[in-house]
């Protein structure tokens, strides 16, 4: 991402471009506010709206909606069964997403993915949930990698962690067309 010395318009454009890269090609991203630019130690907080015609999959009278908005295009970086060298991450990081999905007119939430237990170890943590709310659907995702160099002996645990993340990120909620919307 760009530097801290950009003005508000530059920061907004940088964020919109970055977020758009995580979404389907036709997505429209509009940032309404952001904060936390003053320090590299705190969190970067961003609020805005996203719209995309390709976000959900139509199945008859239902829409299948990914329970994770921003991680759809990412795969498992650890596919091999064996590892010869230590595992290196560029830096420790934590990602926390909280997204409220406003339902399309004429739809209601039919089902949400079953809650999964939190996946964690000393250095890795993942949790993903989708909940029905009055306005529609609230999706929360939290992922943490606390370390940057791991011995190759930890590879099976790290591989398993990323497989669990991929499984949780591929869950879907189901929206159903209401009778009034026919």
Image: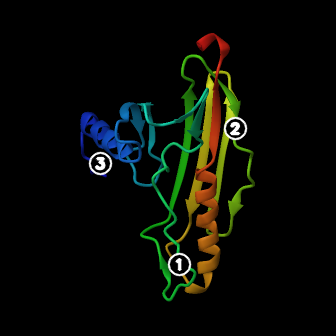
**Badge nearest the viewer, 3 or 2:** 2
Residue 151 picture location, percent across and down: 56, 84
**Residue to which mark 3 is pinned:** 4
Horizontal side of residue 167 vs 92, given as left or right:
right
The image shows a total of numbered marks equal to: 3
Dots 3, 1 in contact, CB < 8 A: no
Instruction: Name the residue rendered at 57%, 59% in the picture.
Output: 144
Checking the image for residue 80, the label placed there is: 1
Question: On the rendered image, what quadrant is the C terminus found in?
Answer: top right
Q: Nearer the viewer, residue 6 or 114?
A: 114
Horizontal side of residue 133 vs 86, given as left or right:
right
**The quadrant where residue 121 appears:** bottom right
Instruction: Name the residue rendered at 64%, 70% in the picture.
Output: 160
Q: Earlier in the sequence, mark 3 or mark 1?
A: 3
Q: Which residue is outermost to the top?
A: 180
Checking the image for residue 112, the label placed there is: 2
Residue 83 picture location, percent across and down: 53, 85
């Amino acid at each position: 991402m760009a530097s801290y010395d950009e003005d508000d318009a530059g920061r907004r454009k940088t964020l919109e471009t970055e977020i758009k890269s995580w979404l389907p090609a036709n997505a429209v991203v509009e940032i309404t506010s952001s904060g936390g630019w003053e320090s590299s130690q705190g969190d970067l907080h961003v609020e805005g709206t996203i719209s995309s015609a390709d976000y959900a999959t139509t199945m008859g009278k239902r829409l299948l909606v990914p329970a994770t908005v921003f991680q759809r295009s990412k795969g498992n970086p650890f596919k091999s069964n064996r590892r010869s060298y230590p595992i290196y991450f560029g830096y420790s990081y934590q990602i926390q997403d909280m997204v409220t999905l406003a339902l399309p007119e004429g739809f209601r939430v039919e089902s949400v993915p079953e809650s999964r237990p939190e996946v964690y170890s000393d250095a890795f943590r993942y949790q993903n949930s989708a909940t029905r709310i009055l306005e529609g659907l609230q999706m929360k995702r939290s992922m943490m990698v606390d370390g940057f160099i791991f011995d190759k002996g930890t590879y099976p645990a790290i591989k398993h962690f990323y497989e669990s993340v991929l499984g949780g990120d591929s869950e879907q909620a189901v929206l159903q067309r209401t009778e009034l919307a026919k």
